[in-house]
Image (cartoon, helix red, strand yellow):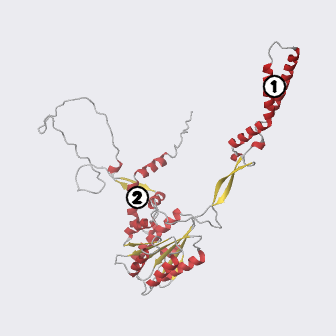
Amino acid sequence: MPYIIDRRLNSKNKNTVNRQRFLRRYRKQIKKAVSEAIGKRSITDMDRGENVSIPRDDVTEPVFGHGAGGAKKFVLTGNKEFVTGDRIQRPPSQQGGGAGEGEASDSGEGDDDFAFQISQEEFLEFMFEDLALPNMVKRQLADSSEFKTVRAGFSEAGSPSQLNVVRSLRSAYARKIALGGKSRRKRRELRMELEALVEPLSDTEVLRKKELLEEIEVLSRKLAAIPYIDEFDLKYNLTVKLPQPAPKAVMFCLMDVSGSMTEEIKDTAKRFYFLLYLFLKRNYEKIELVFIRHHNTASEVNEHDFFYSRETGGTVVSSALTLMDEIIQERYSPSQWNIYGAQASDGDNWQGDTEKCVDILTNKILPCVQHFSYIEIGKRPPQELWYSYKDIQTGVFNDRFDLKAVQDNAHIYPVFRQLFERGVA
């Protein structure tokens, strides 16, 4: 029984290629669906896939058909409205019935919107597209583990895979010219002398011709004995590993958990930080996260406590900024680390503490960091902390500091994109 083996290239990946082409074509609709989904989700399912619906009109393809051709006349029975030369209006197209718009009817048909599922990986790809940490600098570190292989000339020894064929043949050709140059020159002179002998030859010329032929034969054997290529001719590409500057970074996450922060505001702040956490973990391999929670005192906590533990108390914002400055001085030298900070609060602060916050930010933190972001959450008017931070934004470090207002969960993702949009300082 004969067997048929399919050896066509990319046959297994055909569906994958088609899917990528489909995602590129409807990128705009998918990004809109991703943006809407983020505001509706809880923190625990922020990174799962999503069902995306595309209006039927966006996926229809134009179709061309061939008519019967020629000029024809025909009679429509029962025609009381049209005469010869009238133009009949095109009938209205049937709109999709699955979109949920329009009034109810007891008849008629329609097409549903096209719906499909994007995976977790695709969802995160659309979520963080065109985002990057601002002002990231590659720094040369003493303990850098990243190396780049670069060309460093040629070597007489190496592995066969590194053999440079052109250099080797060039070396062999030069060697053959150098070793056989004198013999070739002598053979050329003998051949010219041989050609000068004209028939009929005298006895002396016959003897000389025989000597010339013998000498030419000896020189030819000598030249043929020179090897075409020798081990001495082999040249190998020499490569060396150079240490590369590494974009090593640390992100400080500061969150207010005081009594003025309602559960709704805390949930919005957690959403912002969870987006930030997913973004950093997905896009940067060498980045550390420092989580700081504060009420009247600040403390460094782990990831789980930062997102899920419940605390309350007074509000002293400067305690978190002071702790951040201490950690920078102890563990993260600005000469070796890209330092970033993100602070979320409802704007409340202990009376008289706001000036201390501005002083710490202006004189200690901002000179050391690449960027610092502040988001104020809530629907009430801006608080004292907002206006004080606003003055920092117009000062010397305006390129390293940014602040945004967030009212509810629906505003988190747009604000997040504004803060970390690629190319924004």
At horizontal 28% and vertical 49% (from top left) the residue drawn is 110
Dot 1 falls on a residue whose secondary structure is helix
Determine which of the numbered discs, if any, sits on residue 23 in the image: none
In the image, taking residue 316 as reference, residue 4 lies left or right, namely right
Q: Is residue 224 visible?
A: no
Tell me, yes or no, if residue 197 can be seen here: yes
**Which residue has dot 1 on it?**
190
- Choose between 408 and 102: the one closer to the eye: 408
Q: Quadrant of the N terminus?
A: top right
Q: Position of residue 166 (x, y in %)?
A: 68, 41
Task: Check residue 31 in the rendering and tell me which mark sits there, or answer none.
Answer: 2
Q: Dot 1, crowdedness within 10 Å: few (<14), some or many (≥20)?
A: some
| Percent coordinates x, y for residue 241 in the rendering | 67, 57
| Picture residue at 41% right of the left edge, 50% below the top | 25
Counting every numbered tag in the picture gives 2
Estimate the x, y position of residue 322 in percent, counting from the top left: 52, 81
Can you give x and y, in whole percent of width and height, for residue 260 in the image?
40, 82
Tell me the crowding category of disc 2: few under 14, some 14 to 19, or many 20 or more residues within 10 angstroms, Cα based.
some
Amino acid of disc 1? Leu
Q: Which of 250 and 215 is in front in this view?
A: 215
Tell me how far mark 2 sits from mark 1, CA to CA. 84 Å
Name the residue rendered at 48%, 68% in the picture.
276
Q: Tag 1 or tag 2, which sits nearer the N-term?
A: 2
